[in-house]
Image (spheres, rainbow, N blue to C red):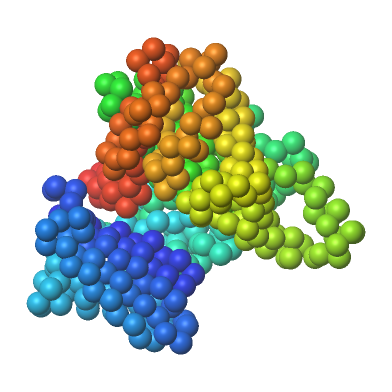
Amino acid sequence: MKFFIINSGSSSIKYQVIEMTTESVLATGMVERIGDETGRLQNTFFPGTPSERVSTVEQAIPDHDSGMHLVISLLTDQEQGVIGDTSEISAIGHRVVHGGEDFRESTRVTPLVIEAIKRNIPLAPLHNPANLDGIRVAMELFPAVPQVAVFDTAFHQTMPPHAFMYAIPYALYEQDRVRRYGFHGTSHRFVAGECARHLGKPLSSCNLITIHLGNGCSMTAIANGVSIDTSLGMTPLEGLVMGTRSGDVDPALHLFLKQNKGMDLEAIDAMLNKESGLKGLCGMNDMRDIHRAVEAGDQRAALALAVQTYRNRKYIGAFMAVLGRVDGIVFTAGIGENDAIVRAESLQGLEFLGVRLDPEENNLRSKQARCISSEDSRVRVFVIPTNEELAIAREVAKVVGS
């Protein structure tokens, strides 16, 4: 039961081979700079074990077809590969960014599913075409293997209309499906399930706030195991302050910048997505660099940290109001799992809502899931590492098994 998990980007392919009987990773890697003069494949066999081996290949990789063939040749290498041939792959899971309103669950790839993913390209013009490239190549290389699409947006399709609708002319929703969709759904679903296990309750009985903090950031309110609100919107630009994305801004900013700075919509969009957020405030989007700068007295770095954690705190408070009872708050992803300062400042002042951190537990560095709230905290706070590839693999197992 070996599953091949693929996350195909516009110029990259991330992948894992997972042995599902033990949920152990046999190989993980990334193909980068597809289409550039020199591409790169870095692969790790048996990561995190005494048998770990790293291989790096640098050569021209003109397209996704050649990139995937390179990956397969490495995985099936007689001396160091982890599969004898492609027939050992039982199923393939594809991360697909946007399923629109077509998909509430993961689904087996069929021609109709492919057409639906194409219909949603206007909602994710940078991501869905690349995801389709990965599906197309995998279907050519593994024609007899079941392929499953796992959508970032599917988990949030349980949001009620009053949470996902924007207060704009309703015809825009009817004709173009303009609404909040949310993203990072695979990560939110995974850590919610893990949190329920730590709470000793079925997920269907849990009210949770899951906080995915990385270069991209999002927060989700989960009531009785399902998403009822989330911070990201129609695109991954809304909501929290991110590494290079602004999060919430006044929509009239676009007109202001056009009239006063002569910027067109494409330039404004590029600025908000690639030059804003932490980077826009202080010139840095790596939180480790920001902390070092704060310690050295950099006031703009301190401001960037304060703006991000203040926005986190506002959303936590809002989602607590939405949920009423909150059983747990979960921090995950690169910053959420590793940054004690961001966690503490994001929860600062929420003691009146029953949220109390244990400073010693919060400051502990660990790769394990753990509770970091004090014993007298009414709301338990957790750090739970996300594992989107394993989450996709579990979704594939459900679909293939059904």
Is residue 290 at least partly visible in the picture?
no
| Residue drawn at point x = 24 percent, y = 74 percent | 55
Picture coordinates of residue 35, whole percent (x, y): 47, 81
Percent from the top left, x then y, of residue 272? 68, 56
| Residue at 35% over, 44% down | 386
Name the image quarter holding the C terminus: top left
**In the picture shown, does residue 25 fall above or below 313?**
below
Q: Position of residue 238 (x, y in %)?
A: 63, 45
Most extreme residue toward the right, as rendered?
Answer: 259
Horizontal arrangement in the rendering, residue 172 relative to residue 334 (left or right): right
Q: How many marks?
A: 0
- From the viewer's side, name the closer residue of 367 and 236: 367
On the rendered image, what quadrant is the N terminus found in? bottom left
Residue 262 image-quadrant placement: bottom right
- Residue 89 vs residue 208: left or right? left
Q: Residue furthest front?
A: 296
Residue nearest the observer in this picture, 280 or 83 = 280
Vertical side of 36 occupied by 184: above or below: above
What residue is rendered at 51% in x and 50% in y? 292
Task: Give the x, y percent position of residue 319.
Answer: 56, 26
User: Which picture quadrant has residue 369?
Assistant: top left
Instruction: Indicate the quadrant where residue 168 lies.
Output: top right
Q: Which residue corresponds to the image point at 32% horizontal and 52% vertical from the top-left?
A: 389
Q: Is residue 266 visible?
A: yes
